[in-house]
Amino acid sequence: MKNVTLEISGMSCGHCVGRVTKALGALPGVKVEGVEVGKARLEAAEDVAEDAFRKAIDAVGFQVTAVRS
């Protein structure tokens, strides 16, 4: 497992946090550790591609601006 922090633009409230949490939690091999406005922390299996995070966040109306491992 690898620790990943995502910087996310467009989030502004608790509802946004819930949408991001749900989207990331639905990805196989991902355990969400915490989400706050503008940021998500998670553990991901080594084979989970960065593109999977971006697609999941895009699908709920936000944008990943940075991925840090």
Image: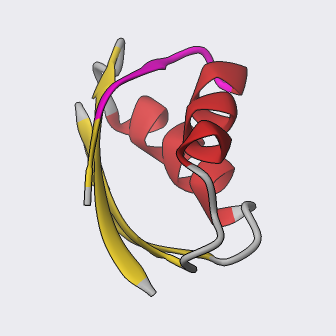
Residue 67 image offset from top left, x and y in percent: 31, 41
Residue 39: name its quadrant. Answer: top left
Query: Is residue 63 located in the magenta-colored stretch of the structure?
Result: yes
Residue 47 image offset from top left, x and y in percent: 65, 71
Camera-side residue: 19 or 25? 25
The C terminus sits in image quarter: bottom left
Camera-side residue: 21 or 44? 44
Residue 16 image offset from top left, x and y in percent: 45, 31
Does residue 9 appear to the left or right of 62 in the view shown? Answer: left
Residue at point 38%, 68% (across, down):
42
Query: Is residue 69 located in the magenta-colored stretch of the structure?
Result: no
The magenta-colored residue range is 60-66
What residue occupies the far bottom of the structure in this picture? 1
Does residue 21 appear to the left or right of 8 in the view shown? Answer: right
Residue 64: name its quadrant. Answer: top left
Is the residue 58 above or below the residue 35 in the image? above
Residue at point 41%, 41% (across, down):
17
Is the residue 4 above or below the residue 56 in the image? below
Residue 14 image offset from top left, x and y in percent: 35, 38
Does residue 45 appear to the left or right of 39 in the view shown? Answer: right
Residue at point 57%, 80% (across, down):
45
The N terminus sits in image quarter: bottom left
